[in-house]
Amino acid sequence: MSKRVLYVIACGAPPARDVGRLVRLAQDSGWQVCVLVSPSGRRFADIPGLEEATGYPVRTEYKNPGEPDVLPPPDAVIVAPATVNTINKWAAGICDTLPLGILVEAIGKRLPIVAMPFTNREHAAHPAFPENIAKLRSWGVIVLFGPEVYPLHDPGPAAVTWTCSHGRRQPKPSMCGRWRPELRALIQRNDAARACLR
């Protein structure tokens, strides 16, 4: 039986430097992983390292007409870090980048999706942001956001730190152990979806 395919999408924020940890965690949980990054996310992510870890190219751009797909279709999607820009465009159905197109399509396909926004206090205070998080949740997206996930920080690079679900501060942005239960939830949701199709 072939492995389930997980798309990991990383956007333009400092925690994208650590997306390789999420890839390894997913692989250890039995997923075949493909990584996509936003155009801004390429500034943070270790593209050669991610390609070596997954065996697939890291995609950012739409393919040209007539070109074959180089990635297998996803069974589930995680977007982390998800910027305010990504959350707001995604909820509006905007597909102006490949990662956004995949996210919009994933809702239409009713794929299991987990999103972990990363932002500062001022961006999070914009009224559109909590409204769009609520929209995504109402459409079945698991959105990991709130003080129990990580505290909001002030604007500026010096304040960028995530806190793990078990409360231990990390010296740099980290996906850490918060993903393990969410990966289990994705696996369970995916198995339930497959059972319904039998």
Image (spheres, rainbow, N blue to C red):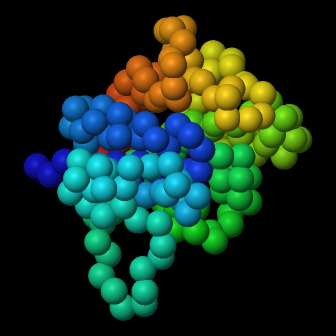
Asked if residue 103 shows in the view, the reply is no
Classify 58 as above or below 65. Answer: above
Q: Is residue 11 left or right of residue 17?
A: right
Within the image, what quadrant is residue 163 found in?
top right
Classify 135 as above or below 69. Answer: above
Classify 169 as above or below 94. Answer: above
Asked if residue 180 shows in the view, the reply is yes
Of 9 and 136, the residue lying toward us: 9
Residue 89 % position (x, y)? 71, 58
Within the image, what quadrant is residue 142 found in?
top right
Q: Is residue 140 left or right of residue 134?
A: left
Residue appearing at x 43%, y 86% in the figure: 64
Extreme-bottom residue of the structure: 66
Classify 69 as above or below 94. Answer: below
Residue appearing at x 35%, y 28% in the figure: 184
Residue 90 % position (x, y)? 66, 56
How many badges with numbers are in the image? 0
Extreme-front residue of the structure: 158
Extreme-left residue of the structure: 1
Residue 117 % position (x, y)? 63, 38
Of 42 and 190, the residue lying toward us: 42
Extreme-top residue of the structure: 167
Residue 195 % position (x, y)? 29, 43
Residue appearing at x 67%, y 35% in the figure: 157
Within the image, what quadrant is residue 34 found in?
bottom left
Residue appearing at x 36%, y 61% in the figure: 58
